[in-house]
Amino acid sequence: MIRQRAKARFVGRRAQLTLFTENLAKDPFSEEAPADFLFHVRGVGGVGKSTLLRQWQEAARRADAITAVVDENDVHGVQQALVELVRQLEAQGEPCKEFGKAVEQFRREHATQAEPLPVDGEASVSSRVMTQAALGATSLIPGAGFVTAMANPEAAAQGLDRLRSASRSRSQRRGGRGDESGLSRAFVAELERLCRRQRWVVLFFDTWEQTAHYVDGWLLRLLDEEFGPVPANVVIVLAGRDELTERDWAPLRAHVVDVPLEVFTEAETRALLTSRGVTEPAVVEAVMQLSMGLPLLVELLSLARPNSVEDLDAGGDFADVAVERFVQWITDPKKREAVRACALPLQLNEDVFDAAAGPKAEGLWEWLCGQPFVSGRGDYKHYHAVVRASMVHQQRAHSPQGWASAHIRLADVQAAWRGSVEERLPEAKRWEEDEWRRHRADETYHRLCAYPGTYLTAALEQLVHGAGQSVAVLRQWIETFEQAARDTTDPDLLAWAGRLQSALTSGDPTLACLGVLLSHAGLSADGRSRAFTYRGNRLYFCDREEEALAELDRAVALNARNVTAWSRRGEVHRWFGHYDQAIADFTTALEHDPTLTWVRSQLGDTHRQAGRHDQAIAEYTAALELDPTYAWALAGRGEAHQRAGRHDQAIAEYTAALELDPTFAWAHASRGYAHHQCDRYDQAIAEYTAALELDPTYAWALGARGEVHRAVGNYREAVADLTAALENDPAYAWAHATRGHAHHQAGRYDQAVSDLTAAVELDPAYAWAHATRVQVRRQAGRREEARRDLDRAVEAHPEDVSCTFEKLMFEAVEGRPQSSAEQWNQLVSSQVNSTDADTSFSNLIRSLFIDTENRVPEATEELLATHQGRGDLADLLSYLVELSALTDELGHRARQCRDLIMEHDPDVGRP
């Protein structure tokens, strides 16, 4: 009914309506004259942008389109915007089930990241794999080549966290971007599905001057098809006060249909007034002068039904006069008071309406929603900004005491609603709950409006909490604060709002805003401690660990009971490999609150990474006693079993974790890794694939699946997976090196060298990649290049097993095995072989280079019984081919071993 009334009132803007309607009549897939897909409606407040969008939406639906529209009330981040868009699209079509799954996954990951100390599963595993490859720990990274089987796996594990590359911080930063990338890909997939069934899908973004703060960058990425191809029959409409920023939108400028809205012409103004029954010439002239052609004011003045020029006394601001005249001409006093009272809340639903307008306004909610200055969809409505600003100004000026009393009453109501939410939420979860934050923000706004000076410090303390959540939450909180500053015109509030808005535009809004907040001398010790904690947290995830540690030291000094600070400091110490200090900090946190399951689990992670597997398992078990549904602790316990070589027990733990959380991609990938360790390649690939179905951007799962393909000799599939991993994470050194390894085994030496070089450039400490490049160059016949490369590798990594192995192999290939026999013996004797496969390879090396009696046939058969991977055998075969060219006893033994392997599998070594 309200939409029909709005449609009936619509006068003017015929050219703009025709422009959009004619565009919808075009063929979206035409190559000669395609339809436009991007519109930007712009103009000053009150010029009719939202009204035009409503008419465009009606036109789109008549053209067999489904539509969705969001504005500043729906958008406080990408996730909220997408959820609201999909909600509206679903109401006109079919359920978007895949997007729903993506939302649940996003919320789960966001909840995990919101805990003070979750270990990011992908980062932990991904960095572990890179570390193991660098240190040559084949027992932890299967298929890295037989050579690396000789390394001590525990030595690799000890260096895990100190060598976690930027992968950790990249994956953590995805909390603001990467997780939303998954949502965005699911959103684009739903658009593609809907567009197959509908002629058009039209997405409207109103009040772009506000919503752009949250989704401008996302929309540019969407249009750049970063999340997948956007269907040709998707139309996007933006409406806001300002022009699009040239710096960001310049590449798309040629595709933007610019629709500037000017004030009504004289003819349009007269037409609207005539349609409202305002025809007295003198009155029409007065309306045109007072409204200045602004459609909203023309509408309000026409609805006041003025009979004479005196009814339109123009004393004062023209907007204030128009709004006040409209209110005065509401003849029902209950309605008039309801209109004024409901201007104070920032947003309205029926509950807020009842609280603001009181019992006298019972039954008037639908009437208010039908007024021309009230808009909004879904649960909340709001006044037009021009109208609200005028009403707020008048009420504050006319009755300061009434203004303060009304705001206190509304603040108390919001506080009561907030209290109801708190009854079902633990304190640690409150800031994660949208409903709780909304009540808290509205309460803060009303108290600031009532008593700005009294409540300033408390509001800044709330801003500290907001900064600790996300940039989107921080921005929303600052906008609320800024609105209170504008509505009160309080100088102190305005000054703080300016400083905070300036900080929001900095390179790191969280750090900048917290820095501004810490400059407030009135901030409590607890508030300052939290601010330093959040700064430390942010610095940690920006790879600025030393600075993070300093901030967290300040946090615990100010508040020794700040368990978040103790826990985060423990995490930073663990990153540095300071395991005892990390354990001390985690233990202190638990002394203050023994119920913190995630801290108990973090303690388990620390013991595990320090190589104390049994202690780790004990801590995970304690965490599970506190919360038997804690999937992360189950997976961590599985990881500890895996580190200890108990792969079947690890698989059982991962399986239990997945029964609790089937969307736990890291547990799928880790279970695949355990199967890989046990040479169950098909099961490993199935698990990695399951992980990738949950998260297609999971670079480690892509790389690990590629490594399985390489290990069994499927080099094409290996290169494809590793390339996909690098597309998601171009700085993934391990994926570069492993793709180089696959190229090498497929006989593509130049591509192998290129990839291995990229790995070494990304991580100069990556000894295995350096040693493998020596092998590739030597086996490609580039002996001099290989010799120079070997000298650099040995100089850079004198203690590394893979570099030592390549040095000894180089001497053997050159016919100098006797000069290195003792070194071979030292190398083999120094190894701790944790698996049968490791032992069998060490025995083969002994039979080739050390034993006087020829035991090559027995050693080869033993090795073939324990190794099933064709890719690994191909790696060994490449060395045997080199050694087979020798004419001495070593050459004879190498030929024996080569022939037995070829007899076992004639396809080994074929590209």
Image: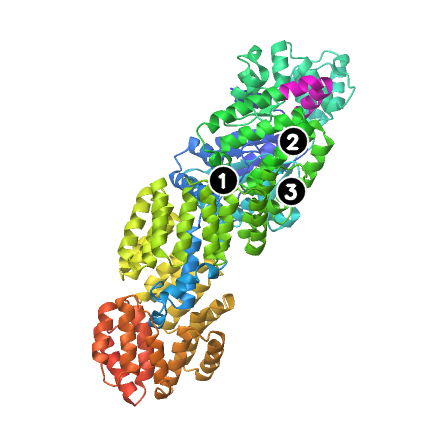
Which one is earlier in the sequence, the residue at label 1 or at label 3?
A: 1
Q: Badge 2: few (under 14), some or many (20 or more) residues near its Cα, within 10 Å?
A: some
Residue type, label 2 = Gln
Mark 2 highlights which residue?
483
Spatial CA span between label 1 and label 3: 30 Å
Magenta segment, principal secondary structure? helix
Tell me the mark number nearer the camera, choosing from 3 and 2.
3
Q: Residue at x 29, y 48 (%)?
A: 655
Give the magenta-colored segment's residue range: 388-407
Badge 1 marks a residue whose secondary structure is helix
Residue 638 among those drawn in magenta: no
Spatial CA span between label 3 and label 2: 22 Å
Mark 3 highlights which residue?
518
Mark 1 highlights which residue?
79
Badge 2 marks a residue whose secondary structure is helix
Q: Residue at x 49, y 74 (%)?
A: 796
Q: Position of residue 897 (x, y in %)?
A: 25, 79
Q: Is 657 displayed left or right of 266 in the figure? A: left
**Residue 309 lies in what quarter of the image?**
top right
Q: Tell me which colouring the rendered structure shows.
A: rainbow
Tell me the mark number nearer the camera, choosing from 1 and 2.
2
